Image: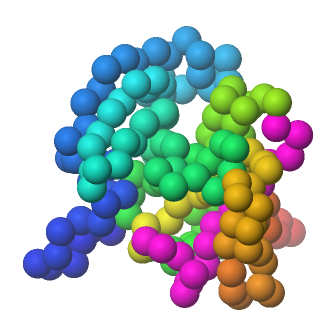
Amino acid sequence: MAAAAGRPPCLFCQIARGSTSTDLHYAVRSLFMPFYPNSSLLLLYYFVVSLWDNALLLLSVQDEMVVAFRDINPSAVGHYLVVPVEHIPTVKHLRRRTEDYHLVNHMLNVGKTLLARDAPESMCSRFGFHQPPFNSIDHLHLHCLALPFIPRWRQVKYTTLGPFWGFIEAEKLLDKIRPFSKVTS
C-alpha cells in the first residue's frame, strides 16, 4: 500500500526503504544463516545508525519482507520492533490469507531470533501488536519484549483489553488470521 496522495510516507516506510539518513556500516549474514538456511536475501545489520528527531536507531535485520530495529523508547530490557517492508496500517488490515499469515509468522520468527541472540538471559519474553486505537503509528509493527519491563509500570501498555482492544499476542493474532484449510472430498 502506498502513501496517500500528497502525504509523505510514514516513518516506518521510510526506514524500510532506507530513505531516512540511515547509513549501513556493517553487514554480516553468518549469524542469521543458521536460523534461516534457505534465505538468500537475508542481511543482518549490526551497526546502522540513523538520526531521526535526535534519536539513535540501530537497524538489526533486513530481508525482503521485514526490517527490525531496537525501539527508541524501550519498555523492557530488550525491546525490538519488527516492521513489514510493505505498508500495512494495523492488525485490522490483516485477513485470513496465506500471505498475511506467513508475514506475521515471519515477523515473529525474526523477533524470537533477535531476542535469543541479544537477550539470552531473559527468562520471559512477549511478542505482540497494539490494536487501534492504542497503536502509536499507523504501520504494522511487532513488539518483541525481553522482560522485565523497565520501569514496571510500562507493562500497562502491553495489556490485553479483550479480543478487540489493547495489545494482542502474536500467537493469538496468528490464530485469528490462520487461513481456513481447504476441504477435499
Residue at image location 78% in from the left, 29% down from the top? 120
- Relative to residue 44, is residue 103 drawn left or right? right
* Above or below: residue 68 compared with residue 173: above
Q: Is residue 128 magenta?
A: yes
Which residue does the image show at 17% across and 76% down from the upper left?
A: 7
Nearer to the camera, 122 or 1: 122
Pick whichever, 55 or 175, lies toward us: 55
Q: Is residue 8 left or right of residue 103?
A: left
> Count of labels shown?
0
| Magenta stretch in the rendered image | 122-137
| Observer-nearest of 22 and 107 | 22
* Res. 145 visible in picture: yes
What main secondary structure does the magenta stretch of the protein show? loop
Q: Residue at x 73, y 74 (%)?
A: 156
Residue 113: where, in percent of width, then height? Answer: 68, 33
Query: Which quadrant of the structure image shows residue 75?
Result: bottom right
Residue 68: x %, y % from top left: 50, 43
